[in-house]
Amino acid sequence: MAIVTLIELKAQLNVTLADDDALIDRLIAAAEAHVERLLGFTFADTYDGVGQPTLPLDLKHAVMMLTAHWYDNREATLVGVTAQAIPFGVTEIVNEHRTFTYGV
């Protein structure tokens, strides 16, 4: 179940050309799979089915943020910049919806 469309992500990225459509589609699928693993459940099994709640907009936004980050940063490392996590980013959104915790 794709929760983010190519059109939505291109609007998020402010991309109008079709040159990167295949890349963006692949990144959307990867980001959705990654967020599902962090959550411990799949979107298709949990949301928008008969008798199921609607997909929370913040989870959709988390997938969009992660996809946009991966699109803008296509390498595994950054050199020569100071980077820091954005407050209320992907991890914080996912943590609010996860149904389990990690033992210490």
Image (spheres, rainbow, N blue to C red):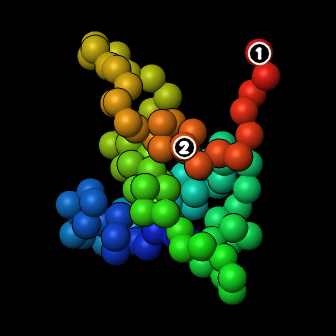
Q: Secondary structure at mark 1?
A: loop
- Kind of residue sitting beneath label 1: Val
Query: Residue at the spot x=20%, y=60% of the render?
Result: 14
Q: Is residue 68 above or below residue 88?
A: below
Report x, y in % for residue 17. 24, 69
Q: Is residue 27 visible?
A: no
In this view, the residue in front, 43 or 66, is: 43
Q: Which mark is residue 92?
A: none
Query: Residue at the spot x=32%, y=19% of the render?
Result: 83
Task: Kindly identify which residue carries mark 2.
Answer: 96
| CA–CA distance in space, label 2 to label 1 | 19 Å
- Kind of residue sitting beneath label 2: Glu
Query: Residue at the spot x=40%, y=38% of the render?
Result: 89
Report x, y in % for residue 59. 49, 56
In this view, the residue in front, 34 or 15, is: 34
Task: Kindly identify which residue carries mark 1.
Answer: 104
49 displayed left or right of 102: left
Q: Is residue 79 visible?
A: yes
16 displayed left or right of 85: left
